[in-house]
Image (cartoon, rainbow, N blue to C red):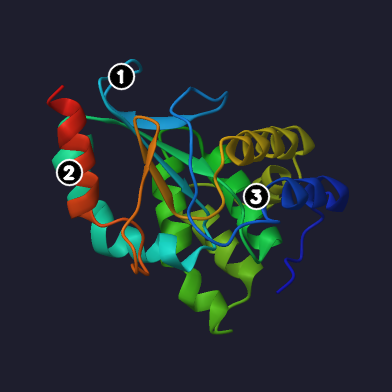
Amino acid sequence: MKLNTTITRAALGMVAAAGLAALAACGGGSTGPVDGDMAKGAAEGAKVTVIEYASPTCGHCAAWQAETGAAFEEKYVKTNKVRFILREIPTPPVDIATAGILLARCAGPDKYFDVMHELMANQPEWQSGSITPRASLIKTANAFGINEQRFTECVTDEKALAALETRVRAATAAGVTGTPTFVVNGKTITTPGSTSGTSLADLSAAIDAELAK
């Protein structure tokens, strides 16, 4: 599906080339800080850092959020046991994912995670054709106090798009090849056969082992 905006196509193409060519399965990742990291939970320098590489158009990411995200938050993030970082890699449809990411960034750090969660939860409405992708995105923008004019400014911000490209390159350089990918203190944690990301049991085993050190 095409998004009816004027996102710079050349810059969008660079994001796709940087991050999407090999997005098929979960890969490795780095715990090191990346400029523009969005984080919550424990402060920087925490004993355990959990990184999720995700996309607002990734069905498995949405499933993880719906099935596991709340329990993970209650157990580790709200208790400040871990520093949780969400890093974006736009997945097909790339223009919709990119616009969603730019919208979440534009909303600001205090609303970023809520916007990303809302975008994932809203996947079925534009996938089913009951609403256009643009209308779905604008509805989300409006829910967080962003009007249509500001939305258009957000998703056509070439500086923000270039920053996303840089973050995608950092992710692929770290060995990330799919979404969602979960990394605990530099080690990728997977649940073989899962269609909704890494299980809470597998994440807990890895996190608790690091906390115990």
Mark 2 secondary-structure assignment: helix
Q: Answer yes or no: do the residues labelled 3 and 2 have beta carbons within 8 Å?
A: no
Is residue 110 in sight in this rendering? yes
Q: Which residue is mark 1?
A: 43
Quarter where residue 51 is shown: top left
Q: Residue at x 23, y 40 (%)?
A: 206
For image coordinates 72% across by 66% down, the residue present is: 3
Residue 167, x across and y down, in percent: 62, 35
Tell me the distance, in whole angstroms, between the alpha carbons under discs 3 and 1. Answer: 31 Å
Q: Report the disc number at residue 132.
A: none
> What residue type is disc 1 on?
Ala
Which residue is identified by label 3?
Answer: 151
Quick one: label 1, few (<14), some, or many (20+) residues within 10 Å? some
Q: For this view, does 28 lie left or right of residue 101? A: left
Q: How many marks?
A: 3
Residue receiving disc 2: 205
- Report the mark closest to the observer, 3 or 1: 1
- Please tell me whether mark 3 sits on a helix, a strand or a loop: helix
| Relative vertical location of residue 143 with respect to residue 204 in this rendering, above or below | below
Q: Which quadrant does the N terminus fall into?
A: bottom right
Dot 2 and dot 1 residues touching (CB under 8 Å):
no
The one nearer the camera, 4 or 195, is 195
Q: Which badge, 3 or 1, is on the more N-terminal residue? A: 1
Left or right: residue 43 versus residue 17 is left
Q: Earlier in the sequence, mark 3 or mark 2?
A: 3
Of residue 111 and residue 189, the one placed in the foreground of this image is 189
